[in-house]
Amino acid sequence: MIVCSANQISKMYAGTWIFQELTIHLHEKERIGLIGTNGSGKTTLLKCIAGVEMIDQGTISYKKDIKIGILDQIPEVNHSFTVEGVLKQSFQEVFEIEQQLNRVTEKMGDPSEQHQLEKLYNQYALLQGMFEDMNGYAVESKINGVLQGLGLEELKTHTFQSLSGGEQTKVGLASILLEEPDLLLLDEPTNHLDMEALSWLEEYLNNYSGTVLVISHDRYFLDRITTKIVKIESGAIEQYKGNYSNFIKEKEKRLLLEFQAFQDQQKKIKKMKEAIKRLREWAIRADNAAMHKRARNMERALERMNKIDRPQLERKTATLEFKNTKRSGKDVIIVEDVWKSIEDRILFSEINLLLQYQERAAILGKNGVGKSTLLRIILGELPPDYGTIKLGASVKVGYLSQQGLVGYDDWTVIDAYRDIAEIEEGEARHRLSKFLFYGREVFQNVGDLSGGERTRLRLAQLMSQNVNLLILDEPTNHLDIDSREVLEEALEDFKGTMLLVSHDRYFLNKLTNRIFWIEDEGLNSYLGNYETVKEKRIQQMG
């Protein structure tokens, strides 16, 4: 059964069409991944389906009495509430009935109310029936399960206003999951989640009884949960059955078929044009009106032909390539017996780490265990409490923080790039175009760039330097899928050593050959990519 049907819908902002005449049908229990480049209109489409944004053309219809839930990045709640209080709002009616039950129970024990005991018993029975129908006895368990699954249990008693932006977003996700709407609309729900929370969310959504429409650039997540992929591009949508990996295969097949159809039609058009030319030549030589007519009829048929556009086999994306550089010594990073505490809390103690030339390692662990802190200690930005950090011979470091490019907010894009690259303006503009900065865009202020643009600009700087050690902190944050894939190709060709922190499991599987896992204040080392190490850890845990 269709739960929501959007027919020929169009949306305009400031005189520009975001998308036009889109049609999409959402069926019961489908889990749909909505993908596309940054700025393609995914979030706008989600908000239109939710009724948060009004469409300019077309119609959206819903199943009768449908309950829709949309994840806002920061939920609108009373900021003085505790986290638990915010989540209880998802069960407001249940808790109101519970309060009524408590009041009736008190009256039943009050001697002055004994004369209407029968009436109170009837009230209690009615309220208890309603409470059980709403599964009220399971509410506390549900709340605790979601808190634990998303790693929020330690924040249960904290006020909402005291949380970071990422923590508030996680609470918003917890709240919308607890409401269990018929149609669940999620915009980048994996942001701010660690590996364990990601796995929990995947399991939760796979068992969800309603329909899920989710925007995500997390390809591993899309592989695990989706039954359909919808891609929005250039204001139009394409739909594919199956998960993300199946979408890649089907997209390639479809593209090859379209290209074959284009080539076949081009051959047919060429033959028809040659035939028209010959007929006209013969008609002129023979002064034959019938031949002239045949040529004109063929020309009209050619004009009426529904022409197939040439399929775009490769979309314009950033072209990234690191400069060749002098190799470092065999031992690149040596961490010996390092301790670090933050505000009297030990993050890690007596940890040891050895990273050697051309290894590609990731530091993993729950949020808050000190992954980024360890990177900053290695970089010399933070001192360890105890222990030593050494960089090997001839090591030249390139660092990408989670914020992308920092310290250049008042600079233009081209000036920030030339500050590192030291090349002429024309050459700088040519190179920046490979990172998707075109025309006048190179003169905008760095402070006005989006997160993805800041990351691209910092990568442009790094790739103009002769670095042989890359330290990357969440490098795929803010990047759409196409940009992630181009970055992966560039990093696969990088000849040096790499140490990164990332929650992008697809990215980790393609690039890493060693994993350092921080847990229980220590650090464990494993050989292999994410999937290999995940299986090893499952076996170790029995």
Image (cartoon, rainbow, N blue to C red):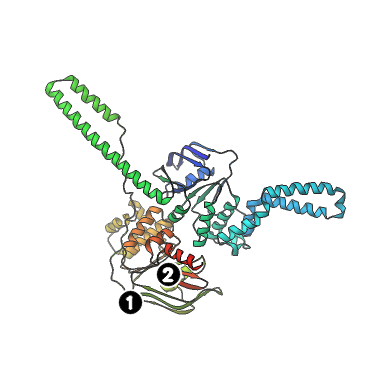
Front residue of 438 and 488: 488
Q: Which residue is mark 2?
A: 526
Residue 409's place in the image compared with 516, above or below, is above
Mark 2 or mark 1, which is nearer the start of the sequence? 1
Give the percent coordinates (x, y) of residue 406: 42, 63
Q: Amino acid at mark 1?
A: Ala
| Element assignment for label 1 | loop
Q: Nearer the viewer, residue 538 or 346?
A: 538
Amino acid marked by disc 2: Tyr
Please give the residue where the numbered disc 1 appears in the rendered image: 393
CA separation in Å, label 1 and label 2:
25 Å
The x, y position of residue 472, in whole percent, is: 40, 65
Q: Is residue 101 above or below residue 331?
A: above
Q: Is residue 125 at all visible to an observer of this figure?
A: yes
- Residue 276's quadrant in the figure? top left
- Rendering coords of residue 159 (x, y %): 62, 61
